[in-house]
Amino acid sequence: MGVLADAWDWLANGANWSGESGVWHRLAEHAFVSGVALALACAVALPIGLWLGHLGKGGALAVNVSNVGRAVPVFAVLALFMVSPLRSAGYVPTIIALVLFAVPPLLTNAYVGMREVDRAVVEAARGMGMSGRQLFLRVELPLARPLVMTGLRSAAVQVIATATIAAMVGQGGLGRIITAGFNTFNTPQVIAGALLVAALALVVEGALVAVDRLLWRSGAPAR
């Protein structure tokens, strides 16, 4: 409990929150990198997963290919980019590595969510004369939403947690607080940095849950 108390004291110290090395600045860096990476991963994975799930073709191959990204250490990808011409491109190497890491859960859940839609419901919608577009937007997508959102929350948490390793290659983010604590043998600072990352992940996940419920209630059909 002594170390946790010391970590709390570190967080309660206003001096640790200001300046370029302070919490607010590192938090903004972390949120920026994580947000851009997650947005790009969604733009790539969700349309592919949803469309392949709608067609029922090629999804298994796409999921297996995307899952290769899970077997590649993100730090190794970052290190590879840092010795390439991209090393002078700011956060680009970190964002690319995080996108590769976030695509698998997004793509997998989007595809599986579409394929698990009750076929009887789909056939009934077709029998009512719905077009492929109407079937996708009004039947399959709403029913696949829970799994799609689960994949989004999982990817968000993974990206936020993994973004801390950007500090290992000299990039910013909350990971810099942790590495600075290691370099100075300041255990309370290390724990404080880890708590900040965990808190950010929980806040983002909670926000996604709230948005999902809000959108579902506003878009739910009247009874």
Image (cartoon, helix red, strand yellow):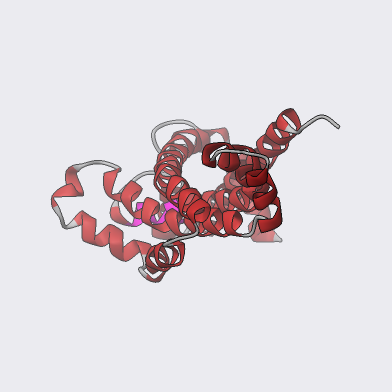
- Count the marks: 0
| Quadrant of the snapshot with the C terminus | top right
Residue 165: x and y in percent read 40, 56
Q: Is residue 79 above or below residue 217?
A: below
Q: Quadrant of the N terminus?
A: bottom right
Which of 67 and 54 lies nearest the eye of the viewer?
54
| In the image, residue 190 above or below residue 68 | above
Residue at the spot x=61%, y=38% of the render?
Answer: 130
Q: Is residue 79 left or right of residue 69?
A: left
Q: Residue furthest left?
A: 85
Q: Relative to 6, is 167 on the left or the right?
A: left
Q: Considering the whole magenta stretch, tell me its main secondary structure.
A: helix
- Residue 72, visible in the rendered structure: yes
Q: Position of residue 75 (x, y in %)?
A: 34, 62
Is 203 one of the magenta-colored residues? no
Classify residue 14 by image quadrant.
top right
| Residue furthest right in the image | 223
> At x 65% / y 52%, what residue is drawn?
123
Tell me which segment is drawn in magenta.
Answer: 161-168
Front position in the image: 99 or 159: 99
Q: Position of residue 120 (x, y in %)?
A: 70, 56
The residue lying toward the viewer, choosing from 112 and 157, is: 112
Whether residue 161 is visible to the viewer of this picture, yes or no, is no
Q: Does 127 sit left or right of 18 as displayed?
A: right
